[in-house]
Amino acid sequence: GDNDDEEKKDSSSSHQQSSNDDHEPTKPNSLPLQPTYTLPPSSLPPSGLRPLDDVTLYRYLLSDRHHKHLTFHPETSLQRLLSALRFRQTHQADLIVRNLASSSPTDIPPSVLRCQTLRIAIWAGRDRHHRPVVFERLGQFFQKGHASAATFEEWMESYLYFLERHFVEMRRAAEATGRPVQRIVYFADFQGVVSSILNRKIWTIVPLLKHLVRTVECHYPEIVDHIILFNVPRMASAAYNVVKGFLDPVTAEKIELFAGVPLERFRECMGEEVIPKEYGGRNEMEYPQTGDA
């Protein structure tokens, strides 16, 4: 339709502007800092789509690069990008960015705050490469079986706030260090997953996670550097294989599994001041248990 043509035109124009600069394209390790998103929604073109920067374009190119041959597929990446831009417009991602930047907690919808108490994750600090560090009590989320405690739309909105927070934290890290920060690192505690298998509540959570990955996460490619899942018992391997089956292959390759708490591996990644105290570090940041619905 006309709207699609307009969106393609705007995206194509931004792509050409990014690639027709006077200088040679920068190398991946010297890309500029994350975009600042300083344009207010009222300044956007009629399509509502934002201008694109080199970092974003490169992320989308990487997302469709062939694993073995390392060849790019620009047309596939372009369609992925256009889909993501429409998704952001439909789900008012700019409003989420504005609310996250606000100093007033009242700007965060109550349903998002409630979902955040049902799925606990904290931004613990930065790793040795200045990347933001997330710890999540994923096993407790399985154990509690909170999928039905909110509608899918509420879970999706909460997850969008979580994903957009990635860019806020990366930008803060880049500003603090004066270096490009393009990804985060993610650590998930699977403690509680055995109980979730025994009470079968895990099978109410898996469809929710699968739906979130397919409808939301696909629009945020290449923002995680590596993923460490720990306290993963042997009994949970079947459940992990189910989850791994619907993950993007590139994402799945970044996953490391540990049966207990891999303190030495944590120390390789970050200083002890970032590692939560309960895992052997010195970070006393509040890291609550998962609440009841």
Image (cartoon, grey):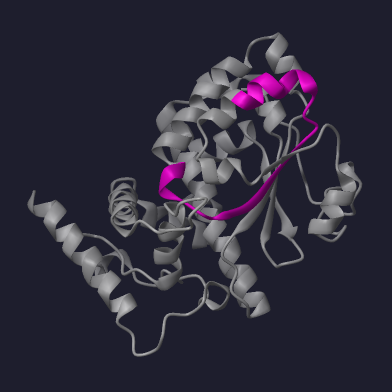
Residue farthest to the front?
69
Q: Is residue 8 above or below residue 252?
A: below
Instruction: Judge from the rendering whether residue 8 lies leftward or rightward of residue 20; answer left or right.
Output: left
Q: Is residue 67 magenta?
A: no
Q: Position of residue 61 (x, y in %)?
A: 41, 60
Residue 282 in sight from this viewpoint: yes
Residue farthest to the left?
2
- At 56% from the left edge and 22% from the top edge, which residue is drawn? 205
- At 7% from the left edge and 53% from the top edge, which residue is drawn? 2
Q: Nearer the viewer, residue 65 or 258?
A: 65
Q: Position of residue 138 (x, y in %)?
A: 68, 33
Residue farthest to the bottom?
22
Instruction: Judge from the rendering whether residue 47 lies leftward or rightward of residue 241; answer left or right.
Output: left
Q: Position of residue 135 (x, y in %)?
A: 71, 45
Q: Is residue 238 magenta?
A: yes
Number of marks present in the image shown: 0
Q: Is residue 288 above or below residue 39?
A: above
User: Which picture quadrant has residue 223?
Assistant: bottom right
- At 62% from the left edge and 14% from the top edge, which residue is drawn? 201
- At 31% from the left edge and 69% from the top edge, which residue is drawn? 51
Q: Nearer the viewer, residue 123 or 57?
A: 57
User: Which picture quadrant has residue 48?
Assistant: bottom left
Q: Is residue 241 above or below residue 187?
A: above
Residue 284 in sight from this viewpoint: no
Q: Quadrant of the C terminus?
A: top right
* Magenta residue span: 217-241
Q: Position of residue 42 (x, y in %)?
A: 26, 67
